[in-house]
Amino acid sequence: MPPLPDLDFVRSQFPGLKQDCTFFDNAGGSQILKSAVDRINTFLFEKNVQIGGSYAVSQSAAAALHEARQAGMTLVNAARPEEIVFGPSTTVLLQNLSRAMESQFVPGDEIIVTVSDHESNIGPWDRLQASGVVVKFWPLDRETLTLKLEDLEPLMSERTRLVAVTHVSNILGAVNDIRAIADFVHARGALICVDAVAYAPHRAIDVQAFDADFYVFSLYKVFGPHYALMYGKYALLAELDTLYHYFYGKEKVPGKLEPGNPNYELAYATCGIVDYLTGLGERAGETGSSRMKVEAAYRAITAQEEALSERLLAYMRARNDCTIIGDASADGRRRVPTIAFRLDGRDAADICRKVDGFQVAIRHGDFHSRRLAEYLGLTDHGGMLRVSMVHYNTIEEVDRLTAALDTILSDGSSVS
Ligand SMILES: Cc1ncc(COP(=O)(O)O)c(C=O)c1O
């Protein structure tokens, strides 16, 4: 088991954590690193001009954008910085991707999406039905609530062009084996597009090891600002249509996919995220490359997350009125600390409001994974409750939540 991270150091890097609030809604959005905010400030105060000019400040702005792509490359282990595309959100990046791919599809081509995905990785593909594309749903195994290749197999055909799948469901918290899915999909001649939003804050990303074709996540859930990043294999990005002006030809990768330019200062914040992770990796004893330090950081993050998950799941397992939605084990290879649950006879919205009173932030509903909530039949009574933790959370915070739940649930009331 890798050593736990130094939590005093970790928490000191997030100014927002000084507030009297236990942040357990991290899958909605994490706290931001000071190092990320510093990069934004540095850009705005020292480099705030358009890139492409010959003057020094413009050159410095262009260098900052390049550095941001290199940081993105280190974060995901891409082969080259041009494989990093920035955009406002995962939703927009996936909508852009489907638009830029649309001309590659002909009527009768098939795309497979999963019932467990956030709508961001379903809607943009579903939309292509208007061009004659056939969209099929990969169901979850009802017993294990996992995606199984044997359920994908009968959906695949010679017309399957793309499988869009989440790395981790933002409700179930289970880690899907992207490499195994990619191998399966590639062997049948299709591409894979991965929504990694609920994975990226928790485990090291290695797009080359995963053999992902497109891989997208949101920086505001990975300790950065409201911004997002898409990785694509260079050769595949080069095939996409331009989303920019006509004179941005196909060869303009990634600029043709960033119409109106990326937001320079928010992109530059990626450097602050990688600075933090490499620092955390050094503290874990790693002395190798930046990439090796990032991987070491995620090992320490996993250790802390497993401890948090186990504390909360043990509490839930011990209650006879609590149903954990998904894997009840804390094993960091199988799940991240995004834990959804229901309490018998209780309205999730009401519980959430009561938990607010203890300065603990959790959330309820369907988390925009509406099709999954419907598939599970869990849309009534405020939907599901979700506690989503990250490595800066503490065991004491878990205890604060469980004490609050004990108090709230002792009133004996139930939904009518
Ligand atoms: C799993 C998952 N995918 C996609 C999204 C959408 O991300 P964004 O808000 O950047 O569009 C979210 C947001 O909660 C999410 O949890």
Image (cartoon, rainbow, N blue to C red):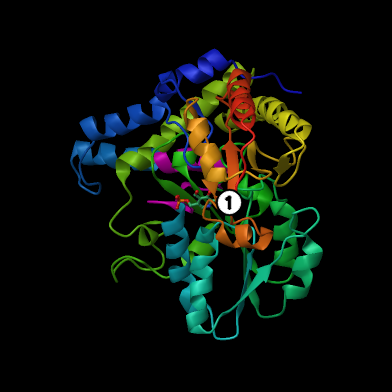
Is disc 1 placed on a helix, strand or loop?
loop
Residue pictured at 28% horizontal, 57% vertical = 260
Where is residue 270? Give x, y as percent.
43, 37
Where is residue 306? Give x, y as percent.
70, 29
Residue numbers of the magenta segment: 68-89
Q: Quick check: is 81 in the magenta stretch? A: yes
Question: Is residue 199 visible from the viewing direction of this image?
Answer: no
| Amino acid type indicated by mark 1 | Gly
Residue pictured at 72% horizontal, 43% vertical = 323
Q: Residue furthest top?
A: 8
* Nearer the observer, 112 or 279: 112
Few, some or many residues within 10 Å of mark 1 (<14, 14–19, 20+): many
Quarter of the image that includes the N terminus: top right
Where is residue 187? Give x, y as percent.
75, 67
Read off the residue under disc 1: 383
Q: Answer with left or right where residue 13 lies relative to residue 191.
A: left
Where is residue 101? Give x, y as percent.
48, 71
* Nearer the observer, 256 or 160: 160
Residue pictured at 60% horizontal, 85% vertical = 108
Residue pictured at 57% horizontal, 25% vertical = 393
Q: Answer with left or right where residue 68 lies relative to residue 278.
A: left
Question: Is residue 377 visible from the viewing direction of this image?
Answer: yes
